[in-house]
Image: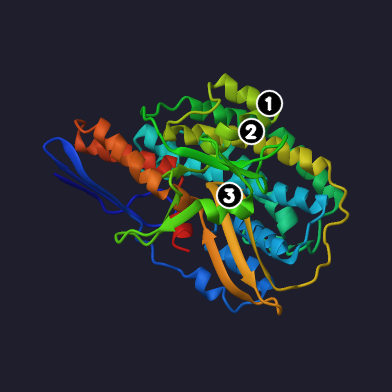
Amino acid sequence: MKIDINYIARVEGESSLKLKIEEGKLKELRLNIWEPPRFFEGFLVGRKFDEVPDIVARICGICPVSHMTTAIRAMENAFGLTPSTEVKRIRKILALSQILSSHLAHLYVLVLPDFFRLNSVVEMLPHFEKDIKRFLRLKEAANSITALFGGRALHPVSMVVGGFTKVPLKADIEKAVKELESLHGDALETLKMVSELKCPALENNAEFVALKGKGEYAINEGMISSTKGLNIKEHEYASYFIEDEVPYSNAKRTIIKDRGSLMAGALSRINLGFDNLLPDAKKASETVGLKGGTNPFLNNLAQAVEIVHALQECAALLRGLSLKDYFADFKVREGSGSALTEAPRGMLYHYYEIDRRGVITKANIVTPTAHNFLNLEESLKKLVTENIDKPEDELILMCEMLVRAYDPCFSCSVH
């Protein structure tokens, strides 16, 4: 028997899944990411360093802040520039606002319809008005924070190497803090809603990998850590992680050298950084029974926990801003630099080589979906094998739900 899911709906980008089952056993499974290649790494070569943030933002319309921040940090490392504490704080605010926005869209629009056997969020509208209104309130607040510091919610314009070209007025920041604080109940309701969704049982033996910080929930910097003992600095990334290709997909797959596949994303961050969640988020997570886990379907619940955390940390960071030292002068020099951040979907890597004129001579980008690709295939094989006797339509739905639980961005993966 062959099962062809020719188009996996409600994910970012284009992909298909092909299964071959013989005599009650899975013989072949292929996740084909057939989104056309986009060659960002190629056409960045020859461009000036200050063009890079705006260009890489176009890799993704959902996580432009992550691509911009990671690229900027990589080039600052190449130039030997350490940004101010204020710049780091604002960058984390922007990153948290994007995590909020991305997680909300994923959970409410992409994931939720599955659990009510609906095809889209449009079909939910007549019966889930309260939930949709909650989603819109939270999404609008997240977008407004991105726009407050970025100049606009999509593809910000004020983020540059060295810091920011401008910052908002104190009164606008105070207004934003009040709005975020008023939505704490909505964030908790979102977590409650997701915790009540019944997910299939599935164990994942992968190595969970994420950035880990000292005393803070790591987003824009930290040690590369894993549940199996990895603990390295970001500039050591290329010594431990490698990409390979498969003939049936346009996306590369990343593995840890001599160790195998990995899983990145919200569940990995919870597994490694649970103790660094803010108290309310940690308490809420414990209330719904999540301190970590190996079931990839729990990535949805981990995202809901991060919504509670991100909303509160955004407000706390906003209250602590001085609105000073938001840009630092620097000297362009020849060199190379890399950086890692936690994008909404997981660990994101950028690497650049720059000549003395500030022109890019080499670029490499590894996205969260590339980090997750092999493990997603392995999880799909395990899911199908353990549910091989289920009706075909139910098996197809379970596979699609698992793909969506990983929250892939196939557009990013073929950058």
Residue marked by disc 1? 280
Number of numbered labels in the structure image: 3
Left or right side of 403 for 322: right
Label 1 sits on a secondary structure element that is helix
Amino acid type of the residue that numbered disc 1 sits on in the rendered structure: Asp
**Which numbered circle lies on residue 288?**
none
Q: Is residue 78 above or below residue 323?
A: below
**Residue furthest out toward the left:** 23
The answer for how far apart the CA atoms under marks 3 and 1 are is: 22 Å
**What amino acid is labelled 3 in the image?**
Ala
| Residues packed near mark 1 inside 10 Å, few (<14), some (14 to 19) or many (20 plus) | some
Q: Nearer the viewer, mark 3 or mark 1?
A: 3
Residue linked to disc 2:
308
The answer to whether mark 2 and mark 3 are in CB contact below 8 A is: no
* Applied colour scheme: rainbow
Q: Residue at x 44, y 62 (%)?
A: 414
